[in-house]
Amino acid sequence: MKLKRSKENLIYKIAFVGFIGGFAVLFNQCTNKSVGETEKLAQKPETSEDLKEDKALKEKAEIYFASISSLPKQEFPEEKIELGEKLFMDTRLSKDGNISCNSCHNLKTYGVDNLPLSPGDTDELGARNSPTVFYAHLHGMQFWDGRAKDVEEQAGGPILNPVEHNIPSEEFLEERIRGIEEYQEMFANVYPDSAQPITFETITKAIGAFERQLTPLSRFDKWLDGENDALNSQEKDGLTAFIDKQCITCHNGPAFGGNMLQKFGINGDYWELTKSEIIDHGLFDLTQEERDRYKFKTPGLRNVEMTFPYFHDGSVEKLEDAVRIMGQLQINEELTDQEVKDITAFLKSLTALPENE
C-alpha cells in the first residue's frame, strides 16, 4: 500500500514538474515574442509587400544620399597618413604645447570634445563649437562660415588662430618642426623630392591625408548596400520622415550636409529656441552683407548622435531637442513626438567609428 502511494506521489510530482516546466517554456516563448516581436518584424520583412516598401524607400534614399562604400577611395602613401596622424596628435603644434588637433577633435569621441566651446592653448574659449573631423573631407567647405575650401586649408586655420593653437606664424611652426629629428626623417621620406620637405603647406597636407581616412561605415551604409535588416522599422520610418519633411534640402549627399550655407532661423530667431547666450551673426561677420546674417554651413549629420552639444554655439544638449528646434526654425513645422523619436532613431543609424578606435 505504501509502495503504491509512493508510486502515485512520484507520478503526481513528475506530472506537476512537467506542467510547471511546460508552463515556464510557454511563458518564456510568449515573453520573448512580446519583447522581440517588434525587432523581428522591423529587421526582417516577412512579406513581399514589406520587401517592396523597403526597396522603394531605398531607391528614394539613393536619390539624396550615398553609401560610404560607393565613394572612390582616396589613396595616399601609408607613411604620409602616419605622418599626418602623428601631427594631428602632437601638442607641439600649439605655441605652449597645451593642445593638439585631437584635443578638440578627439578621435575616440567621434571627432569632438563634447563641449559647447573648446579651450585653446591659453585656456581661452573659441568662438564656435568644434565640429567633428570624421567625414569632414566630404564637405564642400570648412568652418561654420565656410571660409576654407578643404580639410588641408582648414588644418592651418586653428594652428595660426591666437585663441586656438596660438602659433605666431607659419615660419615659427616650420622652424620648430624642422628642429625635431624624428620629423626630419618622416618628412624626408614622405616628400623625397623636396629641397625643404618641412613647410607649413606639407604639414597641413599630411594632416589632410590622415583626415581623409576618417570615413567609417555605418549601419545606414550597410542598409544602402543591401543589408535589409541593418535598419529597424522605426529607423526606416525616421528616414521616411526625414525625406518627406524636406530635411534633405540642406542635409543631403554622402555626408548628410556640409555643402551649403543656410540661414539658421528661417522661421524665427534661433536664440529664442536654443537659449543661446550670445547671438552669432554667422557669415555676416566676414562679408558684412546683410543677406549673410545668421548664415552658417549646414553641418554633416553623420555621427550626430555622439557629437553633442549641437549648433554653432553648442547651445543644445539633446539630439531630440535639436530635431524639434530644426522643425520649428527651418521647415516651420511642429513635429509630433513620434516624428521626433523616429527621426532621432534614424539619425542614430549614422553612428560609426573606425575599427581601430
Image (spheres, rainbow, N blue to C red):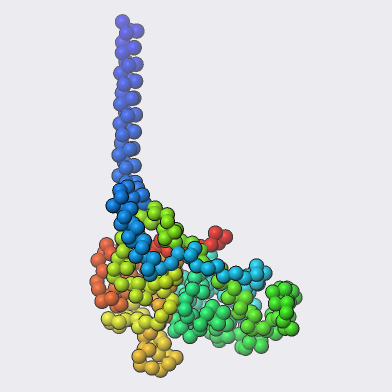
Vertical position of residue 99 compared to residue 59: above or below = below
Residue 182: percent from left, percent from top: 73, 73
Q: Is residue 78 left or right of residue 333?
A: right
> In percent of the image, x 61 and y 78: which residue is there?
205
Q: Quadrant of residue 243?
A: bottom left
Could you say which is closer to the camera, residue 6 or residue 300? 300
Vertical position of residue 49 compared to residue 191: above or below = above
> In percent of the image, x 50 and y 70: which residue is there?
134
The answer to whether residue 114 is seen in the rendering is: yes
> In percent of the image, x 47 and y 80: which residue is there?
141
The answer to whether residue 317 is seen in the rendering is: no
Q: Is residue 82 left or right of residue 1?
A: right
> In percent of the image, x 33 and y 37: which residue is there?
28
Residue 136: percent from left, percent from top: 49, 74
Residue, far top: 1
Q: Quadrant of residue 120?
A: bottom right
Q: Quadrant of residue 281?
A: bottom left
Residue 33: percent from left, percent from top: 32, 42
Which image quarter holds the C terminus? bottom right
Which image quarter holds the N terminus? top left
Residue, far bottom: 288
Residue 104: percent from left, percent from top: 52, 74
Count all numbered tags in the image, as a single digit.
Answer: 0
Vertical position of residue 300 compared to residue 169: above or below = above
